[in-house]
Amino acid sequence: MITLRVNGKDRKLDDIDPSTPLLWVLRDHLDMVGTKFGCGKGLCGACTVHLNGSAIRSCSLPISAANGQSITTIEGLAKQDSNGVVQFHPLQQAWVEHDVPQCGYCQAGQLMSAAALLQQNPNPNDDEIESAMAGNICRCGTYKRIKKAIHTAAKAEASS
Amino acid sequence: MSHYEEGRTLIPDVDMPAHVVDKINSAPAMFDEAKKGPLSRRQFLKLTGIAGGGLVLSVVVGQPRLASAETAEPDKPFAPNGYIQIKPDGTIVIAAKNPEIGQGVKTTLPMIIAEELDVAWSQVSVVQSDIDKERYGAQFAGGSMSTPMNWKPLREAGAVAKDMLLSAAAATWAVSKDSCRAENGQVINTNSGAILTYGQLASAAAGLPVPDAKNIKLKKREDYRLLGSFVTGVDNPKIVTGEPLYGVDQKLPGMLYATFTKCPSFGGSVKSANLDSVKQLDGVVDAFIIEGGDEQTGLRPGVAIIAKSTYEAFKAADALKVEWNYDNAASESWSDLVTKAKALTKTQGEVVSSKGDVKGAIEAADKVVEAFYTYPFVAHAPMEPQNCTAWYNNGKMQILAPSQTPQSIAPLVAGTLGIEESDIQVTQLRIGGGFGRRLMNDYVVEAAAIAHKVSAPIKLMWTREADTAHDFYRVGGFHNLTGGVDKEGKLTALRDSTITFYEADKDAAKPVRGGNASSGDLQCPEIANLSFEAHRLPLKIPAGWWRAPGSCTMAWVYQSFIHEMSAAAGRDHLEFLLEQFGEPRWLGKKKARHFNTERAIAVTKLAAEKANWGKPMPKGKGQGLSFYFSHLGYFAEVAEVTVSDRNEVSVDRVVVAADVGMLLNKAGGENQVEGSVTDGLSTLAGQEITFENGAVQQGNFNTYPLLRMPAQPIIETHWVTSKYPPSGLGEPALPPLAPAVTNAIYAATGHRIRTLPMSKEGYRIV
Ligand code: FES
Ligand code: FES
């Protein structure tokens, strides 16, 4: 049996092939489909989630390696305040405002990579953003807006 | 000043599927049809996917009846057509008719309606419409046609509704309609200052006859408040929170997961497979052979595996061993094609079009340039791999499809499986990238064929490798060009000897999809002597429409070669290019799809001005210019590059000047330009599909690289506002990018790139 803490909730998985990548556990077994399949080989970043706070490619992590650990997915990026009202992460807010998405398919992965970046480096410069985000492909070419939105979110965090 | 005639035939000069062309040209008629009838509650619910709610629409046919707030049923919503629903509680719902593939139409098309309806955007919720030809006319995402085709009908849909709300208010107040004004979802009585909201008027308006759109005045452009502003995507909040919007996110009760393995060489069929051992594998529920047929766009032969999860299905597919029958399979090799094409284009081909006397002009020329240009096949590589969910239950087929041509699904599935079209229900979903890939419904018919044999809903999922190796590719091309300039440095002659592929075993006169390389869309009307020659070659590799079909490669070839000729003449490229346009005028019939040199000149001058064209550049840096007209849009681009002595190319900045008539949504429109520029660069940099024995040699993003964030240039977009109707932005910014960059590399290094991707010539984008 595998146990996981996903977005703050404990989840148990009986009878699962331990080699199943975390991506497919989230999508098929836990019905959390926000995390996307793009390549399955760690090449595109569409499947990025946080494992104990660090950005990882969930398509390349067998569930056995995640046993007992804490995972945050795109569904857990926004927080609920004490009244149960959903509060967007500053990055989500900035993504909407700057109209980052085109098709939007890569954006869950982009956001999770960006969130991990801001956690480690609250005020990244362009070069730092580019190197942190280079593992995330956007086929639609929204990079310019992603960069802008990360700066906006960093500013918002700093002033809050 | 050039004059413009608004015409019905808006289709641009690119080869689109015949059924799409038909739909485009018949769309206005279909819309008129659709407007006639009243819309039943059931229909509206079906169309807009709005569940629940007390929606009843009863348009009084025949005798017009003046409505008043007292006599109308108090909770009756107002839904004068398939696009708009206003409920008495003030809810305003607008339906988006076309598939959203990232081109922004789910936001922009409803904005057109909201503008004429005079509602504040914040009051509107947008829903994706159902697939219904009668009500919505053609529903597809292709050819950048959503905007030009829907511009008039959607404005009319909004204006008709507003007119009815005004009538309802006038009747309620017993004043003339002239003293009523609509604004921000309410009607104001200009005499008394009284206000009624659209919600308050909904029931009364619902009781009115729907007026003929012909008699309703549309707003003037200068009165627009919403169109032209920065409106963010309607799905953005759902996208950033990971809600299930896409095809891959669908789940039906008891759903199983499917893979479908086809022959690596296109069209190969199944001799045998180790089905028994596959069926023993963990999680596998079933495995079977699907015979399929020969049609590239239909159901092809392969092996289906059904499992309890995607991972188990993928794992089983890895263990699948198939013996293929290659009798009918493709057997081409890209390197053989290159050799053949090089030799053929040196010989005289069939003259497809010509003007003047090319031979004489070249003999008389002061300088002659000969050049061989070649570009590869490329894949679409949308971020969301192909997938489809289908459920065959009680003789009915339900299909949840990320498709750019959802209306083509029912006929294809019905014809393949022998089900009645009326028993097939298709739901359109947000799509993780189209680029033309999903104009084909091959993966949809696969899902339906599998579901037909399984007593549960199934979700078919392709791997990235399958997506790359079983695409409908942009065809590669070969152009042997000869040009001549006279003593005054004027371009007097151009000859292009090229290859036109046709589908093997089919009509040799019909080029493959997107492969009409011999049409010679040069856009240089001033050249007096021209000759376009084609050599025809059969092709079994499936070809398809790839973002800006034809234009995406033609622009590179011709706009590079024009630059070569300007260099041979020792002239400034900007001046030389403007000379090719000649006087400001229409070429053709003064229709949006015909070339207007006035608009070409304007964007070319604007791009040059904004980029400070001709400014001194230090060693290793250069500027490159190009122009192209496609999909009704006029685009000029200037690229600035820095090239290191190790041939690393940094594209520092791209300045874009665009004329699409009017920019409808600043947010979505600029996103499209930035995306197209990035896509153009990504393709130019290192994308290439090669094949051996009819099988594609690339698979995942390690062998088919896409541009990543550090390599994206600064992109600046400048808009020319012209009086022409707005046109689409999904494609036309892409074609000029490649020649702008390769022209800039020439300016920086003196090296002319004539083979794509540029990695082939040792240049790397960094
Ligand atoms: S799906 Fe995991 S990196 Fe691409
Ligand atoms: S928005 Fe389409 S892949 Fe990034």
Image (cartoon, coloured by chain):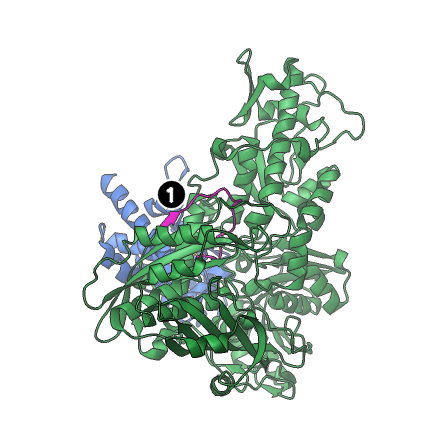
Chain colours: A blue, B green
User: Label 1 is placed on what type of residue?
Assistant: Glu
B435 or B28, which lies in front?
B28
Magenta residue span: B717-733
Picture quarter containing residue B456?
bottom right
Determine whether, in the image, residue B567 is placed left or right of residue B20: left
Residue B765 placement (x, y as % from top left)? 31, 69
Query: Percent from the top left, x then y, of residue B114?
Result: 54, 36
| Of the pair B239 and B351, the residue shown nearer to us | B351
Q: Is residue B371 left or right of residue B417?
A: left
Instruction: Residue at 64%, 70% (x, y): give it.
Output: B297
Q: Nearer the viewer, residue B64 or B56?
A: B64
> Predominant secondary structure in magenta?
loop
Left or right relative to B22: residue B578: left
Q: Looking at this view, name the residue that lies furthest to the left.
A: B618
User: Label 1 marks which chain's residue?
Assistant: A
Q: Residue at (59%, 69%) from the top-left corner?
A: B513
